[in-house]
Amino acid sequence: MKLGINIDHIATIRNARGYSDSVSLIRAAKICKKNKVDILTVHLREDRRHIKDNDLIVLKKISKIPINLEMALTQEMIGIVRKIKPSYICLVPENRKEITTEGGVNIKKLSKKLFKSLYDVCLKYNISLSAFVDPNKKQILMAKKYGFDTVEIHTGSLEDKKVSKKEIQKITNSIQFAYNLNLIVNAGHGLNFNNIKYLKNKKLINTIHIGHFVIFESIFTSLDKVIAKLKRITR
């Protein structure tokens, strides 16, 4: 499996004091490069609670790692994609009142007009287009029909104190189902050192994306050590 590291919450901490420079994110990108991280993930939310527009511009300019841009399907974000041209895009739902992403995107509710516009941009600039979906076969099948080349399976239920066999099996079956549809399969949300083991069919997963846990755990060790350990776990 490839490893994608989300560095959003470094910006969240920075923003808490009203700072806006991108120095901390640049440092994080360099540590990711040192540890051979495969993908650098950032979520440019509409309310800009994490990274800011300039952060994305700077990271695209200096990062030696391909960037995965998480975003809502809006005209504004499509315009940013045209300028930045990230290597990957993952469509996610956004809710102003949520603390973090609460579930997968409902593909049926996506604006067909906006999706066509984004899809054309992705074709033009060879950008891989993914949908962040719940472990639900209907959503996965719909993603395939819409033209997504990748799905990222929402693994948030694995973060529960008691992980049920039913949830593990649901995620396992969803990964297999997506793979059988010839979709590239990623997984992410709530993953950490301990619950990665619940991903039973790792060989079918292209990339796992981990964010909040990485930054939180780094407080007690270091970003360098956390990423290095994740690299060992995901080999």
Image (cartoon, rainbow, N blue to C red):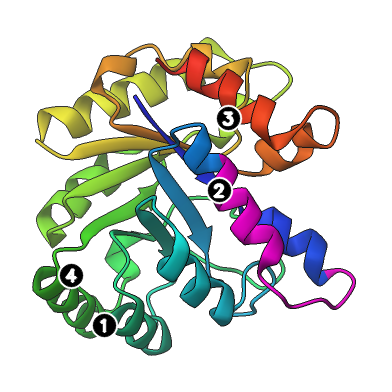
- Magenta stretch? 16-31
- 130 in relation to 177, above or below: below
Q: What residue lies at 35% left-to-right and 34% top-to-bottom? A: 207
Where is residue 167 shown, x and y percent of the image?
50, 22
Q: Which residue is mark 2?
A: 30
Q: Which residue is mark 4?
A: 122
Q: Which residue is mark 1?
A: 114
Along the line of sight, the residue nearer the viewer: 196 or 19: 19
- Report whether 184 appears left or right of 59: left
Q: Position of residue 151 (x, y in %)?
A: 28, 45
**Could you tell which of marks 2 and 1 lies nearer the N-terminus?**
2
Q: CA distance from mark 2 to mark 1?
A: 34 Å
Q: Secondary structure at mark 2?
A: helix
Q: Are marks 2 and 1 in contact (CB under 8 Å)?
A: no
| Callout in the foreground (4, 2) | 2
The residue that mark 3 highlights is 191
Q: Residue at x 63, y 59 (%)?
A: 25
Q: Disc 2 versus disc 3: distance between alpha carbons?
A: 22 Å
Residue 141 rendering spot, x and y as whole percentages = 18, 45
Quick one: label 1 or label 3, which is nearer the N terminus?
1
Answer whether labels 4 and 2 touch (C-beta < 8 Å). Answer: no
Image depth: mark 4 or mark 1 in front: 4
Q: CA distance from mark 4 to mark 1?
A: 12 Å
